[in-house]
Amino acid sequence: MNKRFILPLAMAAAVFALPGTALADSYYSEQKVVYHVNHDNEQRQVGAMRNIQNHINAVGADRMSIKVVMHGNGLSLLQHAKSNEDLKAFVDQLKMQDVDFQVCNNTVVGRNIDVANDLYDASEDDIIPSGVAHLSHLQQQGYTYVRP
């Protein structure tokens, strides 16, 4: 192969090897997104976490504000993460990228859930008064609603 083509090809390969960051900078603007989780299905929950990571890869963690609002059966995401290594890894990875996991107090009280012991890596700081009210509140603040 001609040497004058090697450097441009190597540079192009490096750009496409990065997980969306090089292209995302010029394609997507900053985003605020709320992901709604209210289902008890581990495969679907893992898929939702994968969707969030793909979203971050496309836009860039430093250009996003992401909230995961869980209520009703959705709190099982953090219950399953106590024993499901895939969910646990996703929760840890997403939290390191400043994704907020928010837990509905109505569900906590109604189901008598001990936040510190029953939910993976959750604390009182993660509690919101009402999952559905918070979804509406965040949308009023300009967050885009996504329900994977």
Image (cartoon, rainbow, N blue to C red):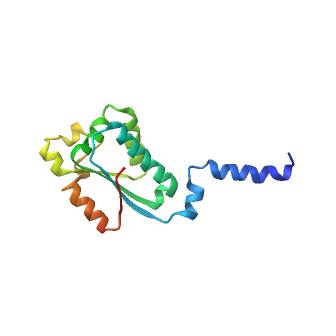
Residue drawn at 13 percent across, 41 percent down: 112
**Residue 52: percent from left, percent from top:** 42, 50
Q: Nearer the viewer, residue 62 or 34?
A: 34
Which residue appears farthest toward the top when viewing the image? Answer: 83
**Residue 107: percent from left, percent from top:** 17, 47
**Residue 38: percent from left, percent from top:** 26, 47
**Residue 71: percent from left, percent from top:** 23, 49
Residue drawn at 45 percent across, 48 percent down: 53
Q: Nearer the viewer, residue 54 or 83?
A: 54
Residue drawn at 40 percent across, 45 percent down: 49
- Count how many numbered circles sit on residues in the image: 0
Q: Nearer the viewer, residue 123 or 39?
A: 39
Residue drawn at 56 percent across, 53 percent down: 20
- From the viewer's perspective, tell me whether residue 95 is left or right of residue 120: right
Occupied quadrant, residue 47:
top left
In the rendered image, the quadrant that contains the N terminus is top right
Which residue appears farthest toward the right when viewing the image? Answer: 2
Occupied quadrant, residue 64:
bottom left
Q: In the image, is residue 29 above or below residue 115?
A: below
